[in-house]
Amino acid sequence: MSASSSTLVPPLMMREEEEPRNWTELPSEVTSLILLRLGAVEILENAQKVCKPWRHISKDPSMWRKIDMRDLGNRRLKDLDFDTLCRHAVDLSQGGLLEINLDFFSSDSLLAYIADRSRNLRSLGIQMFFTAMTNGGLVNAIARLPLLETLEVSHTCLRLDLKAIGHACPQLKTLKLNSSGSVYDGLDELGYTFLLKYDDDYALAIAESMPELRHLQLLGDRLTDTGLNAILDGCPHLEHLDLRKCYNINLVGNLEKQCLERMKEFKGPDDSTADYPYDITFVNSDTDSYYDYYYESGSDIEVNYDGAGTWD
């Protein structure tokens, strides 16, 4: 064996001789950054119970400027009271909460609790699929959030009163809705084209009550060119427009040109939704849900979908 090779120390031995890292002795600023990556539920259920230093850091109001309780995944199967956890997180923010995202457990009472204790809130995101929330509860809460600039609502089973929401939220700059759209996402690959019922109610409400919008996302909405024209006229500051899955839009005349020239970013009905961060199954549970569709070979087929998973 050569002299040079005999002096080498195996990497494994070097690792074994090092002292184990004591994570509780990290600077509090570093620990805070690590814990923030865990999310609200993990901090409340696990991290704050590890040791006193972590518990102390977890109680710092600066840790609770943003609370994200959406996309909980398998935690839905666990026996956790997400309503209570969310209220506890809001309390820990001590009025400094700026952004909150809620999942399936949202309700009128929870939203009222948040609004009463978070008057500085700038951003609110809600998944309203089969939640105990009403239009009145949403509007009343928003009316107590004078600084709200961003509202995102996805998978709603409610017919939202967007006009009331707009009037209650005069500083709204960003609106994102994933509401009434294609529950048949992906079936177009099989050769089906869906003719969704026309509905410009949301578009007209937005045009009338949200003149300060800069960002608008309407995933799977049923608006037509008429509604789109109203939005362009009523929202003069609009810079980002996302109309993916809005298959009732034809962009006739110079409408598409207007969108492309005026917007910093424009996404049309057929653009990819691969970058959408949440479940992409669009939901439409309106009681008047009715869709006609036809096979591209020319054979007309009529199907009634009742909004509750039943095909006739």
Image: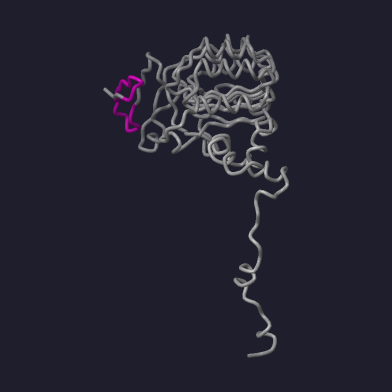
Q: Residue at x 52, y 39 (%)?
A: 274
**On-image quarter of the N terminus:** bottom right
| Above/below status of 30 relative to 259 | below
Residue 176 seen in the current view: no
Q: Residue at x 58, y 44 (%)?
A: 50
Q: In the depicted view, which residue is nearer to us: 100 or 214? A: 100
Q: Residue at x 51, y 14 (%)?
A: 160
Question: Toward which corner of the image does residue 198 lie, by quadrant?
Answer: top left
Q: Main secondary structure of the magenta part?
A: loop
| Above/below status of 20 relative to 295 | below
Q: In the depicted view, which residue is nearer to us: 254 or 100? A: 100
Question: Toward which corner of the image does residue 234 lie, by quadrant?
Answer: top right
The colour style of the image is one colour
Q: Residue at x 48, y 22 (%)?
A: 128
Q: Is residue 304 magenta?
A: yes
Residue 106 seen in the current view: yes
Q: Residue 116, percent across and down?
A: 62, 15
**On-image quarter of the C terminus:** top left
Q: In the depicted view, which residue is nearer to us: 191 or 257? A: 191
Highlighted range, magenta:
294-309
Q: Residue 153, percent across and down?
A: 53, 23
Question: Toward which corner of the image does residue 184 lie, by quadrant?
Answer: top left
